[in-house]
């Protein structure tokens, strides 16, 4: 029972971090978003490059994204599933992003490690599928 | 020291599963690939749909992919990083896929759970980035 409690406690901590990510993005607060990531995070993001290695590259990408979107951003997660161990955890979800005329669903996978007492995102992967002509499918809905 | 040994033993098991995935894909053996996945796997794949829920949908997608590629397929992983706990693990890598005229790098994130004595893939995410015009960036190299 203790192990089960520990696991559900960790899942609840990860859920709080996912909620905090959503709140920080909705507030367009780059530093608040970045506080969730490990300095050595590797991100496979929606825009290029193929990968961001380290938080500085990821931060610049977020700053550009927020700058591109003059309107309010609203993100909402669907089908969130968290899998937690003692020291590592991962989560997947569909993320519904709405800002002005933009209304899009993306897939998100987020991987966590416990660093000291804190859980940090060490890897993230965000994307949409690609059709047979090489176009990003930016209008799919779950 | 025992905990460290256990962790590195798990990482080595996960590495073997990643190698087996590559070998099974290179052999174009759908059932050998599918043996690596949990029946309830959720896949965010390169082609649509937004998500495959369950192994049957994922299997059909793999069959279509292999049928599309009459030539030999060769996959090779770069920058593979495995993070392992006692019961769960995750891995990320860049995957270089070559088949006939196709020569492409994709990003791959693979999440594992220990089910009984066996490690199974419970979640996988494969993609390329999207440019500002919505095109999949199928020609990026690391």
Image (cartoon, coloured by chain):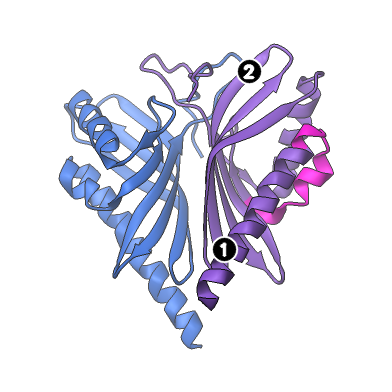
Chain colours: A purple, B blue
Q: Residues within 10 Å of mark 1 (few under 14, many from 20)?
A: some
Taking depth in this image into account, of B81 and A139 the one nearest to the observer is: A139
The secondary element bearing badge 2 is classed as strand
Indicate whether residue A34 is drawn in magenta: yes
Residue displayed at 28% across by 42% down: B55
Residue B122 coordinates in the image, percent (x, y): 38, 51
Q: Which label is found at residue A70? A: none
Cα distance between the residues tagged 2 and 1: 33 Å
Residue displayed at 23% across by 31% down: B60
Taking depth in this image into account, of A92 and A70 the one nearest to the observer is: A92
Indicate whether residue A38 is drawn in magenta: yes
The secondary element bearing badge 1 is classed as helix
Q: Which label is found at residue A103? A: 2
Q: Which residue is mark 1?
A: A8
Left or right of A69: which side holds B126? Answer: left
Read off the magenta span.
A25-41
Residue displayed at 44% across by 74% down: B8
Reply above or below: B74 against B121: above
Left or right of B14: which side holds A139? Answer: right
Q: Chain of mark 1?
A: A
């Amino acid at each position: 029972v203790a192990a089960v409690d520990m696991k559900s406690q960790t899942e609840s901590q990860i859920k709080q971090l996912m909620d905090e990510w959503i709140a920080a993005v909705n507030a367009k607060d780059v530093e608040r978003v970045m506080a969730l990531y490990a300095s050595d995070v590797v991100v496979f993001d929606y825009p290029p490059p193929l990968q961001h290695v380290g938080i500085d590259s990821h931060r610049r990408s977020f700053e550009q994204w927020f700058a591109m979107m003059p309107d309010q951003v609203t993100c909402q997660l669907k089908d969130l599933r968290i899998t937690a161990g003692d020291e590592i955890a991962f989560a997947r979800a569909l993320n519904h992003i709405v800002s002005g005329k933009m209304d899009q669903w993306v897939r998100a996978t987020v991987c966590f490690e416990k660093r000291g007492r804190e859980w940090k995102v060490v890897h993230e992967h965000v994307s949409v599928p690609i059709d047979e002509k090489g176009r990003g499918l930016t209008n799919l809905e779950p």
